[in-house]
Image (cartoon, grey):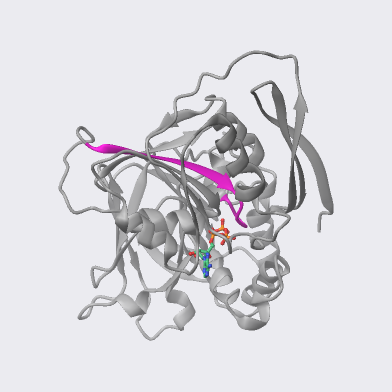
Amino acid sequence: MSGETVYTGHLVTVNGEDISVRSSRNGSCYSSFELLRAKTSDSSELRLTAPQNLIVIDSIKSGKGRTLDNDFYSIVVKPVLDMIGYEHTVIKTKSHDTVSQIAKELNVNESHTVIFISGDTSISEFLNNLSTKSVFNSEQGKAELCILPLPMGTGNAWASSLSHVDPVQSFGKYIRGSLTLESFPLYRAVFPDDYSIVFFIIFSLGFHANMLHACENPELKKMGTERFRRAAETILQNYNLDHSITVEHSVGTYAYFALINTPNLELEYRPSPLSDALKSELHLLGYSSNLNTKKLTAKIMQGYQNKLGDYIQEDKNVTYRSFKSNFDIILNYPKDSPRHKFEICCDGTLINLLEHQRDDIYNKIHFEFLRHYSDFSLRVFHR
Ligand SMILES: Nc1ncnc2c1ncn2[C@@H]1O[C@H](COP(=O)(O)OP(=O)(O)OP(=O)(O)O)[C@@H](O)[C@H]1O
């Protein structure tokens, strides 16, 4: 377990003042922020163009949750937006539905910029609830919806894959106008009963999905990040990780099966180093059920060593394959197999495939590469 790190980062120079922030964090969780202001002789002016409809969504349960000391919006974002004269609306989430509700209510005729103070799940809830009523065949004519994900959750897979490693640094770059705005890919998983979910990070079966389902156990839920280690141990010891899955006519038996869009799943954990969060491409990362527990664990832990662009060598126990257009997967085991064999994790949403069967079909999932999802033209600030 890493200890508390305290550091100061420059944010912006404005109105003859140098604004910086002292942050204190433990792993991915921030315990405090302090805004520091000092007079400066630097008279350079910021060239600012206030965005239309700036909304800040503070998902207050993300990470370890907000306290008076780590309230990034009140301590940093609000004072700085006020200093530079950016009008904005802030929404501090009140319930599990707040983010979905905001997404549903956005006026599709106007452009918006949304700053998320959150982790991945809040952004997933937002994207899944955007208006998709009109049928647009292109991005032309759509209002823009620009997203800035400030990493204040637990995993922060999307933000860290887009080089947002620290909320202060990324907010500072946004204010100084030094981020790039680009469109980003989304995918849809469609189940036999036509239930579907849009995702942008990971869709998994087997070890990864089972571990996240196991973490929901109330006993484990209380344990912070320790719960992942405990859940992993339980699964490796007690579950048959032998999922026979057909992907595009190719059959494999996997202990670990993941379709991944982002290189990182956490700031320091990069299981799919050839992925690019801005590129429409899913990588299948699969580890065979032939690997014993020690070897499987070593493969999974390799994600802590991988560097961006590293190639993962395929062999009889490792699958690393890229997909750039729609495809199906089929689970080749009977409906009465243990329930955990149908457990899925999709960007943090936990699903059991058996709850989405239709007639005799219980084992097929269709993956769509979405070209013109939603009534907005979606963009993300990165780098
Ligand atoms: N006031 C609230 N009451 C209940 N649930 C809330 C409230 N505010 C936020 N939530 C929910 O808490 C979850 C926070 O998820 P988020 O992804 O932002 O953080 P995280 O889970 O810590 O990070 P990550 O997904 O990156 O691991 C979301 O499902 C959100 O809807």
The residue under the point 50% across, 71% down is: 242
Q: In this orientation, which residue lies closer to the viewer: 165 or 58? A: 58
Q: In this orientation, which residue lies closer to the viewer: 194 or 49? A: 49
The residue under the point 75% across, 52% down is: 32
Task: Answer above or below: position of 284 versus 379.
Answer: below
The residue under the point 19% across, 36% down is: 138
Residue 360, image x, y percentages = 22, 80
Residue projecting furthest to the bottom = 336
**Is residue 256 among the parts visible in the rendering?**
yes
Please state if 343 lies on the left or on the right of 78 as rendered. Answer: left
Residue 53, image x, y percentages = 38, 40
Numbered range of the magenta stretch: 142-156
The residue under the point 60% across, 49% down is: 73
Residue 64, image x, y percentages = 67, 63
Residue 155 part of the magenta-drawn span: yes
Please count the marks in the image.
Answer: 0
Q: Based on the displayed image, in which of its 4 quarters is residue 245 positioned?
A: bottom left
The quadrant of the rendering that contains the N terminus is bottom right
Residue 305 part of the magenta-drawn span: no
Please state if 259 lies on the left or on the right of 293 as rendered. Answer: left
Task: Answer above or below: position of 94 versus 328.
Answer: below
Task: Answer above or below: position of 33 versus 362.
Answer: above
Task: Answer above or below: position of 178 versus 81.
Answer: above
Q: In this orientation, which residue lies closer to the viewer: 114 or 307? A: 114
Residue 136, image x, y percentages = 17, 42
Q: Based on the displayed image, in which of its 4 quarters is residue 351 positioned?
A: bottom left
Please state if 350 lies on the left or on the right of 298 as rendered. Answer: left
Please state if 223 lies on the left or on the right of 197 as rendered. Answer: right
Q: Based on the displayed image, in which of its 4 quarters is residue 83 positioned?
A: top right
**Is residue 248 among the parts visible in the rendering?**
no
Q: In this orientation, which residue lies closer to the viewer: 8 or 159? A: 8
